[in-house]
Amino acid sequence: MTNNSSWFQNDYSIGFLAGWGAHPLDIMVWGIKEKLMGKYTCEGTGKFWEPGGMYNNILSWDLNYVYESGVKLRFMSTDVVQEKDVWNYRKVIDYNSTTFFGSKGWISVGRGSGESNIPELQQQFDQFPREANSQMIKEDGWKMGQMYIDVVKGTIKETNPLDEAILSDCVSHMGDIAIRTGRKITWNPVVGEVVGDPEANKIFNREARKPYIA
């Protein structure tokens, strides 16, 4: 089985909802981690691959989350964003980005772009070097490798701790559960359970096939 097949087969993953969704969601965690620590609800809609083939994961999604802190999150697949013209406020279309909306305006950050309607922030984005013949910010991939070495050596603190990965990954899993059950769910990250929903918890923590058991 190829990697592409395993991404879309529910025996191995929950599809791009998590496989690629983790990338904009981790940006969200980096930006407002302290506001994401409590319970939250999730509800929304999604589409699956056409039945009859080997792919059985969610292909397209439009999900809404509400956190105890008051933060509201809308998490959408690229096709939904394009269909609803969600990116109409951006000059550079970055197909994997996160936008924060606040009382002073918005800031939108992706893997290769950054924009804001707040002048002083946009001025800082404008100072980043660009890729040749492109509006995308030039990559400095080597810095991540150096950062990893510095963390291992103890020169700097861990920059991407495990708890942040868990925060972002659980957002994807709750979206998967909400779509599969067709109902609003509430996630309690402290105990690691969907509140009052045994069926939903079975989806989150499935029984492993023998001999692959904990």
Image (cartoon, rainbow, N blue to C red):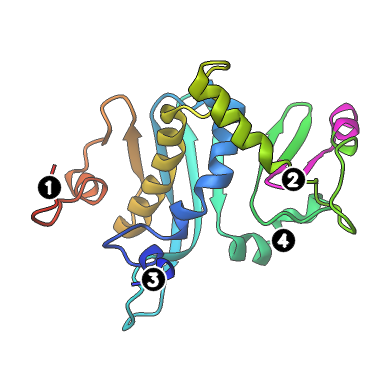
Which residue is at a point 24% across and 48% down the rendered structure image? 200
Which residue, given by chain and number where applicable, does mark 1 sit on? Answer: 213
Q: Residue furthest left?
A: 210
Circle 4: element type: loop
* Tag in front: 1 or 3: 3
CA–CA distance between discs 1 and 3? 24 Å
Point out the image quarter for the N terminus. bottom left
> In the rendered image, is residue 158 in sight?
no
Query: Earlier along the polypeptide chain: callout 4 or callout 2?
Result: 4
Q: Amino acid at mark 2?
A: Glu
CA–CA distance between discs 2 and 3? 29 Å
Task: Give whichever of 99, 21 is nearer the camera.
Answer: 21
Instruction: Please provide percent x and percent y for residue 147.
Output: 60, 29
Instruction: Please provide percent x and percent y for residue 145.
Output: 60, 36
Q: Amino acid at mark 4?
A: Asp
Q: Amino acid at mark 3?
A: Thr
Query: Earlier along the polypeptide chain: callout 1 or callout 4?
Result: 4
